[in-house]
Image (tube, rainbow, N blue to C red):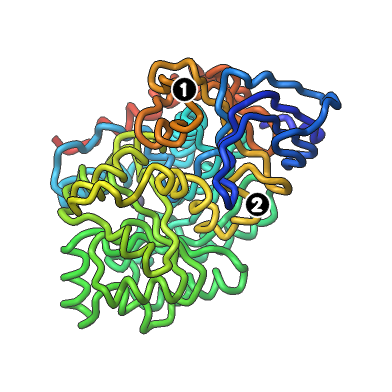
């Protein structure tokens, strides 16, 4: 378990602050943290603190917010590459039937290590055995928004009724400092109306987010239309789900009407370009239209079975290239907008914009120190720092990471865990899962 320490004061001196504040200021200055929150940005005076950090060779960047992941699947990187979605799912279902709570925890620890070492400080997850993920979150010190996967009882490998499991998970973890439990209906292809409505009712009553996959493939849309006569977004609106605070992952196949519906109901969209490209979803999510309609869009990696990385730096880069190329318009989704998706817009998506996503007084001190002497940030000019982060920076440039003012990565080493131990436990857990992989 992570040692709980009293909140301390930290001063980060002389860094290039990429604030992501409303003016998107980039300035040379200091950051002062008291009790886990930012109390000064820029000139914070000379008063000392429990921890003094020299950031003169670094950019100080808000922690990235990964808006869609299945972190426990880190044991399955490369398990189902280069397959159609049907073959990909067949492999995953075979492996899934063998999963245990212990191997979910081992996978989650490996995934969280990868996230922290690439500058991610919050993530939105969808899986089951989420207690194991929550323990990994607590022990390694990241912020986890953990959605218990809900599907129709006859379609699940979970013991018991998924929606009841979700309710119990919420009761166990609500109010935790780092773990925010929530309800996650997997998608319209495994959740009937009754399951959706039960999940919605729990989310409304407990005032937590709903998180789900939506309109990922044409097949999903066509099959749902054949079954119900409605496209998925229209159907969810008709049964009364869209009005609940929610985050929908993918949203590749949308009509203009559906874009309007998502924006009108303030449904956040987690854009996952790498996963969509690798699984050949065929289309490109209408990120520009969604944003123009007023919807909040964040950025997610999805799992490493379909990405195959949890790097938000890599995801920003790909998101930008895909939108520009598909539209024959180099101006869309600028470097600044890409960084917004990965930080402040991710915070909006989680309904935590007052608390996360930027370096501003009053917010949680979740940030990374990014080395300006790394070759991928050369030339390290302040006017190019946002561009370097969106298009060029390597994960290896991320030197140290703080969550709530506490260091969780220092000079590329985890503070609350040992990568070699995490790796060896994960390799052992992966053994049994890989052995059942259909050839
Ligand atoms: Zn997913």
- Indicate which disc residue 355 carries: 2
Q: Residue at x 44, y 17 (%)?
A: 374
Left or right of 281: which side holds 370? right
Q: Is residue 164 above or below residue 401?
A: below
Q: Is residue 376 above or below residue 330?
A: above
Q: Which residue has dot 1 on it?
A: 380
The extreme right residue here reads 47
Q: Position of residue 125 (x, y in %)?
A: 46, 49
Q: Position of residue 413 (x, y in %)?
A: 55, 18
Regarding residue 437, the answer to whether it shows in the image is yes
Which quadrant, please, contains the C terminus?
Answer: top left
Q: Position of residue 402 (x, y in %)?
A: 63, 32
Q: Residue at x 43, y 40 (%)?
A: 71
Q: Is residue 376 above or below residue 360?
A: above
The answer to which image quadrant residue 426 occupies is top left
**Label 2 crowd (10 A; few <14 / some 14-19 / many >=20):** some
């Amino acid at each position: 378990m992570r040692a709980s320490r009293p909140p301390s004061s930290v001063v980060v001196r002389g860094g290039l602050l990429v604030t992501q504040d409303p003016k998107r200021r980039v300035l040379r200055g200091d950051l002062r943290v008291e009790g886990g929150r930012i109390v000064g940005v820029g000139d914070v005076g000379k008063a000392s603190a429990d921890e003094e950090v020299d950031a003169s060779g670094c950019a100080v960047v808000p922690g990235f917010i990964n808006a869609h992941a299945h972190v426990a699947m880190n044991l399955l990187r490369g398990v189902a590459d280069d397959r159609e979605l049907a073959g990909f799912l067949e492999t995953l279902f075979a492996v899934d039937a063998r999963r245990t709570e212990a191997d979910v925890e081992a996978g989650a620890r490996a995934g969280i290590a990868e996230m922290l070492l690439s500058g991610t400080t919050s993530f939105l997850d969808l899986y089951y055995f989420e207690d194991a993920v929550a323990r990994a979150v607590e022990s390694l010190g990241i912020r986890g928004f953990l959605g218990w996967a809900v599907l129709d009882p006859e379609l699940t490998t979970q013991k018991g009724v998924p929606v009841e499991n979700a309710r119990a998970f919420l009761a166990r973890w609500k109010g935790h400092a780092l773990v925010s439990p929530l309800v996650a209906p997997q998608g319209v292809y495994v959740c009937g109306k009754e399951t959706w409505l039960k999940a919605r009712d729990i989310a409304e009553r407990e005032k937590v987010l709903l998180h789900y996959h939506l309109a990922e493939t044409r097949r999903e849309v066509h099959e749902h239309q054949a079954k119900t006569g409605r496209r998925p977004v229209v159907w969810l609106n008709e049964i009364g789900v869209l009005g609940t605070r929610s985050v929908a992952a993918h949203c590749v196949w949308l009509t203009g009407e559906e874009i309007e519906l998502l924006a009108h109901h303030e449904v956040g969209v987690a854009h996952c370009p790498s996963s969509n490209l690798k699984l050949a979803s065929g289309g490109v999510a209408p990120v520009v239209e969604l944003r123009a309609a007023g919807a909040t869009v964040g950025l997610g990696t999805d799992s490493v079975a379909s990405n195959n990385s949890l790097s938000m730096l890599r995801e920003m880069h790909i998101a930008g290239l895909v939108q520009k190329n598909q539209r024959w318009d180099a101006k869309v989704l600028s470097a600044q907008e890409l960084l917004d998706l990965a930080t402040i817009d991710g915070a909006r998506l989680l309904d935590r914009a007052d608390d996360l996503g930027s370096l501003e007084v009053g917010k949680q001190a979740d940030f990374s120190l990014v080395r300006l002497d790394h070759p991928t940030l050369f030339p390290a000019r302040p006017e190019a720092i946002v561009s370097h982060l969106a298009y060029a920076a390597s994960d290896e440039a991320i030197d140290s990471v703080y969550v709530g003012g506490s260091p969780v990565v220092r000079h590329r080493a985890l503070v609350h865990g040992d990568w070699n131990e995490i790796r060896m436990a994960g390799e052992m857990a992966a053994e049994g899962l890989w052995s059942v992989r259909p050839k």
